[in-house]
Image (tube, rainbow, N blue to C red):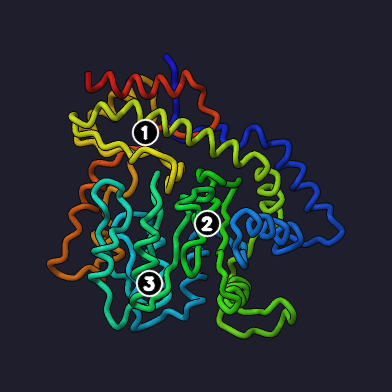
Amino acid sequence: MTTVPFFPPDLFEADKDALLKVLFDVGTDPEQRFILGRRTAEFEEEIKKATGAGAVLACGSGTGALELAVGALDIGPGDEVVVPAFGCRPVASAVVNAGATPVFADVDPWTMVMDPDHTESLITERTKALLPAHLFSVMADMPRFMDISRRHGIPVIEDAAAAQGAVLDGVPAGRWGTLGTFSFFQVRAMGTAGEGGVVLTDDPELATAVKMLRNHGQDGVNRFLHHRIGRNSRFDEVLAGFQLHRLAGFADRLERRAQIADYYTDRFAALADEDVKAPPAGRDGRCYDVYSLQVSRREDLRAYLSEHGIGSHVHYPTPLPLQPAFAAFAPEGADWPNARRAGRSNLAIPLRPHLTDAEVEHVADTLCDFFA
């Protein structure tokens, strides 16, 4: 039986020798610089070239990137940030950890990303930022969010953790917002052998703030002079070297992911009558981090796939405002019906660049067979 795990055990097998070489090179480098060294600077420069960003600041994780973006905007107690009700915890925890209040917006029923209309209805005089997040296969509607931003004079933090390499209307993910963030968590499209992230911005003052905040409030000139209350969110030189190695093949890996997503979407279009929602077709505004369907008979389908050797994964079954950690920020009587529906219906199937055509066809055939 063909086995196609959802989380592959050999994610970086092809890069193992390169990782060991980078580890040796950093460890024996006369500089003995293990954080924020020349490899990190070179990696930041490569991301600048790829995205056209005015400044790129590498940090310890995608979560750290969001926290740095929130901090750079001086968001704190008494402030509100509108965040998606469905998605990964850091969109809300980065706000709460700054002492501010996350305000949860419902998501689009098809794409599962933050709904601009509901977002705008939640804006008050205390709203200090909007924080849309790209999710699974779809970028958020950034033209709409930026229009809301301009009309209300509110900055946008664009969580592009799931979308490095994606492009919407000719603008790369991470470049729409006042600040953008990437994550290099290992399963991301540009994942690494550990943790990492970056903040992107065109605003020099915000870039300076992020640079200081990531390293205990220091300015990089005087190690023992602290201008702000910062944190430790510094990027590792070994991982910087490893990411530089992996950048060369990123476009090809991303294209392979896109080809697999195109194939899945084409195959699953016929299942619409079976209450199966595939992500929207096309390439514009699409990211290929996770391929997630919405399925009414999710648990039955998941068991069937497992019986045929195919792994799957459910993301975020409980919306953020219904989590115990964020219960204090969920207004009494408020509801997020699309987020709840997404939580009980989403099912991700294997999507990684080293899947063979036969494995991809096996996944699609098996899923279609279930409904046949």
Distance from disc 3 to disc 2, alpha carbons, whole Å, reads 21 Å
Q: Is residue 60 left or right of residue 263?
A: right
Which residue lies at the image location 23% right of the left edge and 44% below the top edge? 344
| Circle 2 residue | 182
Where 25 falls versus 73 (above or below)?
above
Q: Position of residue 92 (x, y in %)?
A: 36, 65
Query: Of tags 3 and 2, which is closer to the observer?
Result: 3
Dot 2 lies on which element? Answer: strand
Q: Which badge, 3 or 2, is on the more N-terminal residue?
A: 3
Which residue lies at the image location 28% right of the left edge and 66% below the top edge? 119
Quick check: can you spot residue 328?
no
Query: Of tags 1 and 3, which is closer to the observer?
Result: 3
Dot 1 lies on which element? Answer: loop
Quick check: can you spot residue 339?
yes
Q: Which badge, 2 or 1, is on the more N-terminal residue?
A: 2
| Circle 1 residue | 312
Q: Which of the pair 228/56 is nearer the observer?
A: 56
Specify the amino acid type for callout 2. Phe
Crowdedness near tag 3: few (<14), some (14–19) or many (≥20) residues, C-alpha within 10 Å: some
Which residue lies at the image location 26% right of the left edge and 39% below the top edge? 294
Q: Which badge, 1 or 3, is on the more N-terminal residue?
A: 3
Q: Position of residue 90 (x, y in %)?
A: 41, 61
| Circle 3 residue | 149
Specify the amino acid type for callout 1. Ser
